[in-house]
Amino acid sequence: MTTTAPRTSSAPRHHDTPGFPEGFRWGAATAAYQIEGAADEDGRTPSIWDTFSRTPGKVRNGDTGDIAADHYHRMREDVALMAELGLMDYRFSVSWPRVQPTGRGPAVQKGLDFYRALVDELLDHRIRPVLTLYHWDLPQELEDAGGWPVRDTAERFAEYAGLVADALGDRVPLWTTLNEPWCSAFLGYAQGVHAPGRTEPEAALRAAHHLLLGHGLAVGVLRERLPVPAQVSLTLNLAAVRPHTGSAADADAVRRVDALANRIWLDPVFRGSYPEDLRRDTAALTDWSFVEDGDLAVISRPVDALGLNYYAPTVVAAGGHAGPSPWPGAEEHVRFVPVPGPRTAMDWPVDAGGLHELLLRLRLRLRDELPDTPLLITENGAAYDDYADPEGEVHDPERIAYLHAHLAAVHRAIADGADVQGYFLWSLLDNFEWAYGYSKRFGVVHVDFASRRRTPKDSARWYAGVVARGGLPSK
């Protein structure tokens, strides 16, 4: 164990580059199931993603996270890469079934030992650990008992949070309860394109509430178990929603999506209530009786920071769409409109303006509701069709352009008053990209999935330069 203090950004600013504030944190992010592998080692049991990826037709090419980037065995190599890039922070997630295989009972010490070793290795390299408790890998036994639509899962999550806090609380200064609960609830339980693959809109709304309840219960446990300086946060993938036209009908489509993408999370956490229009829109699906007395007081326990994940904006119009949808109650009223312009390999539009919009909206909201809550960009990045050339190098100018534009948007938002205190690039490594398997590459470090060899891409060296100068290059 080490007590070496992590670095802060104090590099001299070049007069011709957009510098970020002193103390701004530069990092990168990953998730356990996407990189660790070692799916059945040291007591780990299946998560919902192990089960889902083994279900024929659910993941492209039948890929699984059994080996992924093999980070479980190459952790020290990966931390050394982070240090070479000059990263100040590393955001990682803990695998719930590696620590508590059934979702109940005592922790498996071998599982915790991996994260103890990771945290120590990070601190030895003066990199601050930023820990996420849940990045979608629910123990399969808890899903078999009903999953997130069942209230007991929130209680189990709080118990798990306590196990991790007891093991790592003395060394991890920033904790995140949930990553993107919208995906967990609506992609997993309404549309069925993520684990556990259910298409039950009412269950998805119950899952959303119990994810928030689990967050609030975990905040309480972390406050009890962690030392006073430790901070607790929540990470959301909020949507920058725009109308296709200026019509009243398109404005109503924006309202409906904003309720399901944004306000369903922000209102309970910061106001202690659910939006009334959301309740009306979904009245045909549920009477919301799963919200019990006292739940919203638990959910609205204050957090120390709010994480924002952003990749692309959303444009909507009045209309409807067929098939399972991640928008319960809005399917017959909302049509999603393609955004013109360049696109990533995910077919997502490249529009950094949406990030600036979201940050300014959050600045206004937090000013009124929780004025001392700073923001962190906890994920931002792009997938492109990268490959190693005959010399073994990986050139990715599109990713560099994407990152430059989005960091410039963050810089503008800070100048406009948004309290953004850090940026975590997604992702450090090419990885298992959920239902896309290994077909999409988000990493600034290329991974050859046959040999697991790591090769920093041009974007990794570019980002290292940004970190070193504390700002963007002039070109």
Image (cartoon, rainbow, N blue to C red):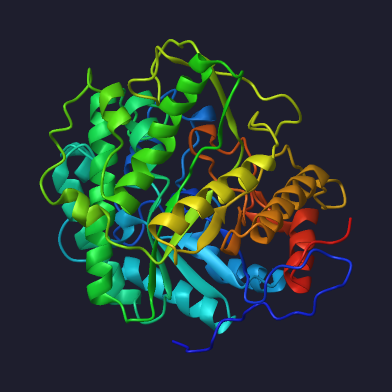
x then y, percent, for residue 252: 45, 21
Q: Relative to 206, is 420 on the left or the right?
A: right
Q: Quadrant of the C terminus?
A: bottom right
Q: At 30% across and 75% down in the image, what residue appears?
A: 167
Q: Relative to 185, is 430 on the left or the right?
A: right
x then y, percent, for residue 385: 73, 37
User: Looking at the picture, does residue 122 appear above or below residue 37?
Assistant: below
**In which quarter of the view is residue 195 placed?**
top left
Residue at the left extreme?
293
Q: Relative to 468, is 256 on the left or the right?
A: left
**In which quarter of the view is residue 459 placed?**
bottom right
Q: At 54% across and 86% down in the image, what residue appears?
A: 5
**In which quarter of the view is residue 310 placed?**
top right
User: Looking at the picture, does residue 397 appear above or below residue 342?
Assistant: below
Residue at the bottom extreme?
3
Of 310 and 99, the residue lying toward us: 310
* Residue 46 visible in the picture: no
Q: Relative to 416, is 393 on the left or the right?
A: right
x then y, percent, for residue 93: 43, 59
Tell me how many marks there are: 0
Q: Quadrant of the N terminus?
A: bottom left
x then y, percent, for residue 315: 58, 25
* Residue 301 visible in the picture: yes
Q: At 71% across and 31% down in the image, what residue appears?
A: 343
Of 3 and 74, the residue lying toward us: 3
